Amino acid sequence: MNLTYRTVFAATAALVAGTAGALAADLYGGSMKDGGGYAPPETTRPAMFYARADFTASSNDLGSVHEQPNYLLNDTHISNSRMWGGGIGMYFSPSVRGDLTLDWSNSASVNVAGNNSLGSAQGQFGVKRMVGLANLYYDFDTRTRFTPYLGVGLGFSRNTTTAGDGSAICIPCGGTATITTDGATKTNAAGAFMAGFSAKLYDRWMLDAGYRFLYTGDAKTSDMAVTYANGTTTTIPSLHVNDLYAHELRVGLRMDLR
């Protein structure tokens, strides 16, 4: 009987030891002969920040152009322009992100003409913009490579006019005159509304394309020098351009930063 008890006890101890060894192997990556310890599963850390670069084609328009204090030029036109820029952004959640952008435009040509009882005038000058915006976007999760979004932006626009010239017919003066003006700079509040989509290209790279309505405020020239046909000169107040805005098509690249 003593031998039987010792045999059963030894068998039970061996079973417990074997079970404990198997559990340890499961928990810590196998036995010594399996090689290596526990390896946690690999996961890709989601990006928190991104960088962007953009090209913009702008169809420009304006509200009005007038000479101080109240001479309204009744025939105005501004040409289209292009912008280049970039920025840095942050993902706040899977659907909400924001970025800071800075864009520069080439010079758009402004042509003006007007007439009243005193005579008529016409001329041209250029206006270019540097626009800085803080933007906020909502990304619609389609669970595909394409992500539509809506966005708004608020910031500033530094509008600079370039040198210009023109001509005038002055009835009280009895002759013609030439007009020249130098550039000037005016800084305004700016705002934007965006709608577009992003498409995943490869790993961290995305194509970003869409529409932007951009409001950049006002611009002005310097005071204008008028030279009459008889050689006399005078100075008249600057031209003021009111309510510059643009309908824009934008395309660019975003790169996630990890």
Image (spheres, helix red, strand yellow):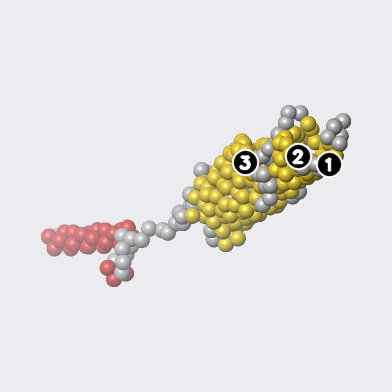
Q: Judge left or right: residue 43 versus residue 221.
A: left
SS for callout 2: loop
The residue carrying pointer 3 sits among few (fewer than 14), some (14 to 19) or many (20 or more) residues within 10 Å by Cα, namely some
Residue at 57% x, 47% y: name it. Answer: 101
Q: Which mark is residue 19?
A: none
Q: Judge left or right: residue 210 versus residue 156.
A: right
Residue at 53% x, 58% y: name it. Answer: 204
Q: 196 or 46: nearer the eye?
A: 196
SS for callout 1: strand
Q: Which mark is residue 176?
A: 1
Q: Judge left or right: residue 34 versus residue 168.
A: left
Q: Position of residue 95 (x, y in %)?
A: 57, 44
Which residue appears farthest toward the left when viewing the image? Answer: 2
Residue 30, picture quadrant: bottom left
Residue at 27% x, 68% y: name it. Answer: 32
* Quarter that holds the N terminus: bottom left
First of labels 3, 1 by sequence position: 1
Residue at 76% x, 39% y: name it. Answer: 232
SS for callout 3: strand
What's under tag 1, amino acid-wise?
Answer: Thr
First of labels 2, 1 by sequence position: 1
Q: In 3D space, how far apart are the residues under numbered discs 2 and 1 (Cα atoms)?
A: 11 Å
Q: 23 or 186: nearer the eye?
A: 186
Between label 3 and label 1, give the one nearer the viewer.
1
Q: Position of residue 168 (x, y in %)?
A: 82, 40
Q: Which residue is mark 3?
A: 185
What's under tag 2, amino acid-wise?
Answer: Thr
